[in-house]
Amino acid sequence: MATLSDSDIEKLFSGAPQYFDRAEGHYTGAPHPSVAFPWDEELGIRDLTDHTQIEDRAWTCASAWPHITRDVQPDRSTAQRASEKKRCAHFYPRCRERPSMLSMGGLEKGSMGFQAALELNVADALKEDQWGFESLASRPHAIVEARQRMLTSRDRLRHMDETLIFEQLIKNGKRYSEQHPHQLRLSSELYNELFLHILHPPTKGIDHRDPYSLSVQIAALVKVLAAPNVWIDFSLVEWRIRLGQLLWGTPDEDQVDDGASIKTTDPVSDVTEERYWLLLQILLACELLVRLDAITEGDELGIESINPAEIHKFEKDANTTVKWSLHLARAWLENIEIVKTDPPSPEQEKPVGWLATLTKRMSIARDHGIHHHKDHHGPVYAIRGRHVERQVHGLQHFATRLRWPDINIYGSKISENCRAVTEGTQLNTPLASPLSKAESHLSSYFTFTGHDVHRPAAPKREPSRRRMISAALHSAGWLSKSYVSGLMLPGDGICHFLMASLLENDPEAMARLGTMANLCGGFVYSGKSFWSTSCVVGRVLAAGKGSAECMGWISSDITPQGLGDGWVNIEVEEPAEDALGINQKARIWAKLAVERESNVLGDADPSSVLPADFIIPFENVYRDKTPPTLLIELDALKLWAPADSVQTTPAEDNAATPFSELSRPAQIRTYPAEISFTVTDLDTYETHQHTYSLAKDVNFVTAHPCAPSSHVKILRSPSSPTIQQVDLSGRGAAGKAVSVVGHPLHKSYTYTALHLSELMAKKDLSLEALLDEYSSAAYRPSLTPPSAKSAAKFLVIDCITGFQSLPQEHEIPLSPAVSRQGSYSSPTRRRSSTNNSTNNINCNNHHSPDPSPITAAETECASPTTLEGVKEGGGVNMESASKKMHSETRRRQFGSDMEILVRAFCAEKGWNALISRRRRGCLACAIREAGALGWKVIIRVD
């Protein structure tokens, strides 16, 4: 048997994703996972992804990775069009959010992509708190001393008053909007501006060939921003969200000790002082970013040449504080402008709407607190969002996609407020009078925990891949202001801001849900349930028919039994394997193992690869016993009262109660969750109840799409499951010629396939026990006799066999590359919990005595996905086959109670699972991806 050449292998695995884990360079942290098609040049294949696009420009701040949003709305504000017109080279720091927010939204609802799955165990939320910055504003003596040295050192900061900071920020905003700032401004002019007003001139490290160069200025700014114990480190998840509180929160809002990792019991003077240092940090970062952009554009235009040694020095000296300050500067320059106005007279003040309240200008003069606005006669420097209309539009988009109750009424109210703001009638008023004491208590309560919010905070926070976040909502509060302004840093903060803004400005929802929110849990409102994707209940219910997902939130028609409107938190624990494999022990650091254990050649020697080393993975084939025909119906989602609760079931009446000045926000209780199903065997009409506890915080990953190879025809012997020959000429030969929509799998990837009915019957067995049954299984993807102790590496859960498919137009949505409409699809009819969708699993037509994975009986009853792409004569119609294989992102039409059941099963057992949909990718590629992740379970759905 002839071995396969390199060219043969490339053709055989054309369209098959390959999984990589490579470092980006020195000082860049954990490696960068990626998926690529190195043997394909067609854009239709190379552009395949396992995640959805960000669908609105208002949400583009979610990720620091370069990306294109899928915004279909033609009407854009003048400021947005001006921003899009600017197409200069930009500097992108090699420091992004982990996990990548682009990959967090998998094609399957409630899932994530390959990159996010590996990055989750080195997530930003796992970082320890920054010493000295545990409170919002009060700083220990060491921090105060470090800042004093910064201002008194001869090669550091000059002392700047507030007016100079504001004027310089205004100047940077204008400079940033220039089309070609490098050509319009000499480096000597920037040098004089920097070292005469902001920094002291450097005393050493001067480039004598060009002492006024941009490199000298960049080095000086990096040195100041990298100084320890001076600046806020925005690589910490908490501070990315607290940024808005420090800018927009009123002093009276910060009087409650909430047990958060960042305290808010700070005097007014401390908050004002910290706001000054934050604005100074923003100014320095903007100065640095403008120069980095200029030198990047100059290098691209051939005007400047960057010395590799200077790049290496920058990457070494620019710590995470510097790089995240650059992200902050970009967000500021893109979304914020500072305007200088005269203070309005008292008679000019009048009541305003909620949107005008969010966007009105806020005095940020350091020596004049909120209480003294009326006594301030000098110019008022104010923060204003550049893209208010875009942000409001994005909030409407978010509410529509989640099928928010009464969205038509709510959306019209937003539009009315938006029109009032664009008329400019309510933008010139200063900040309203301070909040009442009761409102202050509400708005200040903002907690980051890794445990139940009503338990006392531990002295040292336990590491958690997802930080639990609770907040007290307040109409026109700083959470809404952060979103409407657009000043948000990369990460999942945008998900919290969106939901908080939606709730804070829906009076009906606030009245029925109360003011305390668990932004990483869920709530029931108006006959629907809404869940953060940080909550395992949301990730499980997302698999159901009629669920919707948008920006980290899931809506479902399934509500907890007996629970009225209100917030809940779910009691879960990390799977043991996940709890141990974090930070330096995470899978992502095993770069060689990730690539080796997903290699298309398995463990074969690349110089002697034989066709018989590969098999076509089988599915839908059962020789000994045909699985039963099942009817699966979801019965109920139940939340049980916690052990310390006086209630036996969640209360129906959970209305918000008024706050006294001394009261605390209502506590959100934590409940164990379970979900029950009725499974009926339609052959014997036996009915069984199955209940699964959603006890483990498991994750689901969308298997990466693949495209069938158009270069090969696979030939095999009728009695052998392995490939006997690979025909690259397209002509037939002896044996059966099979053109398949999928890829071969090396026989070293041993797996065992269990039908869902068999898995439920063996629910008491561990994963290891199920894999150990491989040696005695009737089918093995290898002719090599197994050893006595051999076990399969992967478990494939068959949720395809006998599934009664819907008509093709209902189950195969259009690809996003073809369909660019429908982002605002109207809400579908709700499915009540008593009228659940059902699933028939009928395997009677799939029985075949042929032990081969590829049989005539299988091809006759396979779905159109398998054979419709085969031309007469054996050729493969790539256009038809590939379209059916990876019609990937109009994902929301998929879903069933069967898929909820299999996810609930995994949540009880603590199995992380890969979800492979046959219409999107082949089983072989899914098994290899599981090998890259170090996971063992693949859920195969239709």
Image: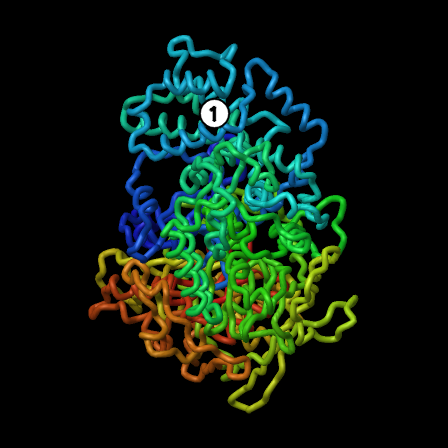
Q: Residue at x 64, y 22 (%)?
A: 148
- Nearest the camera: 597 or 639? 639
Quadrant of the drawing holding the N terminus = bottom left
In this rendering, position of residue 485 left or right of residue 152: left
Q: How far from the left and from the top, in percent, is residue 119?
A: 53, 47
In the image, residue 927 sits, relative to residue 804, either above or below, namely: above
- Residue closest to the far bottom: 685
- Nearest the camera: 172 or 95? 172
Q: Secondary structure at mark 1?
A: helix
Q: Residue at x 55, y 67 (%)?
A: 509
Q: How far from the left and from the top, in percent, is residue 34?
A: 44, 46
Quadrant of the drawing holding the C terminus = bottom left
- Nearest the camera: 509 or 121? 509
- Residue closest to the far top: 208
In the image, residue 176 sits, relative to residue 639, either above or below, namely: above
Q: How far from the left and from the top, in percent, is residue 521?
A: 61, 61
For label 1, count other residues whose C-alpha is less than 10 Å away and answer few (under 14), some (14-19) or many (20+).
Answer: some
Q: How far from the left and from the top, in percent, is residue 652?
A: 66, 76
Q: Quarter-wise, where is residue 394 in the image? A: bottom left
In this rendering, position of residue 358 left or right of residue 9: right
Question: Which residue position is annotated with label 1?
Answer: 314
Q: Quarter-wise, where is residue 454 in the image? A: bottom right
Q: Residue at x 61, y 50 (%)?
A: 465
In the image, residue 260 sits, relative to residue 721, either above or below, namely: above
In this rendering, position of residue 857 left or right of residue 751: left
Q: Quarter-wise, where is residue 535 in the image? A: bottom right
Q: Is residue 452 visible?
A: no
In the image, residue 434 sits, relative to residue 302, either above or below, namely: below
